[in-house]
Amino acid sequence: MNSVDLKTHIPHPARIYDYLLGGKDNFQADRDAANTIVKDWPTLPASMRANRSFMHRVARFMSADLGMRQFLDVGTGLPTSPNLHEIVQGIAPESRVVYADNDPIVLVHARALLTSTEQGRTAYIDADLNDPWRILGSPDLTDTLDISQPVAVSLLAILHYVTDDDLARHIIGTLMEPLAPGSVLTLSTATVDTVPRTFQGMTVANQEGITSRARTKVEVESLFDGLDLIEPGVALVHRWRPDPDADPLDDSQVQMYCGVAVKRPSA
């Protein structure tokens, strides 16, 4: 494989996320940025862990309850077991999963770690969320997924990096439009509804080069326009179909909304 420029001197969201979750695949620039952000956003690590737990639950829900067997995860981040494909292939070994991200270190780790069951398949696309057509047109996607059949699209903890609502809706619409009815969109994104002080932390993050935007519940609901939200609708990530045995979290510790919706048949 050709050498990859990891740009270790520039903080990257995936590596900051990794550091705050206790991972080791990060660099000094990422750690410095994370520590600066957390000074004004002390609940951020807990909120990130709650989002990760949501990913585990929603993956099981989409596979076991909705019967999804094809998955597109955009903004994958650094592989942390259990990954999406491990969860869904543990339920249905024939499941097919395509990951997409644009961080070079994610690419290096994904190719090594995102391995499939014999019955299923995984693939990785080096692509940016802001170029959804590149994702949809990638041979790795078209060789792995059959978009004439339902696909579950995951946009977890990534849309807050898309600060313009019209652009966010365009990205979602572009990804969902060619997919078969019955396809599913699941997303999570940052909010300041629970702790207004979060806005200060996001301002610091923007100053560190991690441009992002928090959304209200109404604004998050609007991202699902044209899709049918599944109960309980848009909710804080720790309140979306929580595991009964999970440790309780106060809402003030969580600054992420989420939701799951299904693409209805055309009229």
Image (tube, rainbow, N blue to C red):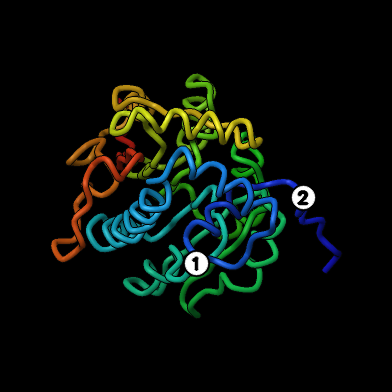
Q: Which amino acid does label 2 sit on?
A: His
What secondary structure is found at the residue carrying circle 2? loop
Which of the 4 quarters of the picture holds residue 236?
top left
- Is 87 positioned to the left or the right of 210 in the image? left
Residue in the picture at 49% in, 65% down? 22
Q: Is residue 151 visible?
A: no
For label 1, count other residues whose C-alpha is less than 10 Å away and answer few (under 14), some (14-19) or many (20+): some
Name which residue lies at 15% across and 66% down: 245
Helix, strand or loop at disc 1?
loop
Q: Position of residue 239 (x, y in %)?
A: 21, 47
- Does residue 194 appear in this view? yes
- Residue 99, position as x, y percentages in the image: 55, 56
Q: Which residue is drawn at 49% across and 61% down?
A: 97
In this view, the residue farthest toward the front is: 39
Q: In which quadrant will I find the C terminus?
A: top left
The crowding category of the residue bearing disc 2, from other C-alpha atoms within 10 Å (few below 14, some 14 to 19, many at least 20), is few
Q: Is 174 left or right of 208, judged from the image as shown? A: left
Of the numbered discs in the image, which one, if any, rests on residue 144? none
What residue does disc 1 label? 80
> Which of 37 and 24 lies nearest the eye of the viewer?
37
Q: Of residues 33 and 73, which is closer to you in this image?
A: 33
Task: Depth check: give the residue in front, 264 or 210.
Answer: 210
- What residue appears at the point 55 percent right and 59 percent down from the top-left corner? 19
The amino acid type of the residue labelled 1 equals Thr
x and y percentages locating residue 12 in the rendered image: 65, 47
**In this view, 219 is above or below 150:** above
Residue 110 position (above or below residue 116): above
Q: In which quarter of the image is residue 228?
A: top left
Which residue, given by chain and number where applicable, does mark 2 sit on? Answer: 9
Q: Is residue 148 above or below residue 176?
A: below
Which of marks 1 and 2 precedes in the sequence? Answer: 2
Determine the image quadrant of residue 83. bottom left
